[in-house]
Image (cartoon, rainbow, N blue to C red):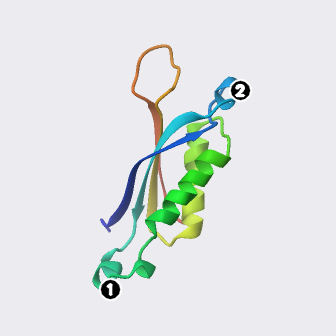
Amino acid sequence: MTDRIVLRNIRLEGRHGYDDEEREAPQPFEVDVELVLDLQPAGIADDLDQSVDYARVYDIVKGVVESTSYRLLEALAEAISREILAAFRVAEIGVRVRKPAVRLGGPLDYAGVEIWRRPT
């Protein structure tokens, strides 16, 4: 299946980071979500009930990023994927989390993780 719903570069602030001081004040995070599912029924019927509501996906991502605190980007990505998989019937989900303000001792655009999960 190659149909996908894509939400690219959701920009939010959250309190995530390995060191305690990184979690003291909100920092910027960027999230991409890709949902793999059959979009043909929704496309033919022009019916949101046969697809996934983008606004609900956005709200889930926003809620997880802004109301939780994780030490690892891996844990944040897992939490986002679990919440979305619990809310929607999709074949697969991809979540990318980027942290642009990361401190690694030199200049870089961001540090990030990408995970792909299927419902269990």
Q: CA distance from mark 2 to mark 1?
A: 50 Å
In the visual, does 118 lie left or right of 39?
right
The image quadrant of residue 96 is top left
Question: As drawn, is 26 to the left or to the right of 30?
Answer: right
Judge whether 99 appears above or below 83 on screen.
above
Q: Which residue sits at x=46%, y=59%?
A: 93
Residue 65 visible in the displayed image: yes
**Disc number at residue 45?**
1
Q: Amino acid at mark 1?
A: Ala
Element type at marker 1? helix
Residue 10 in picture, x, y percent from top left: 45, 48
Q: Is 105 in front, or is 23?
A: 23
Instruction: Look at the numbered disc 2 and give the secondary structure of its residue.
Output: helix
Residue lying furthest bottom: 45
- In this rendering, is residue 47 above or below 61? below
Q: Nearer the viewer, residue 60 or 1?
A: 60
Q: Which residue is mark 2?
A: 20
Q: Is 110 placed left or right of 69 in the picture?
A: left
Residue 23, located in which quarter of the rendered image? top right
Q: Where does residue 83 sit, x and y in percent of width and height? A: 60, 60
| Residue drawn where x is 61% and y is 44% of the image | 75
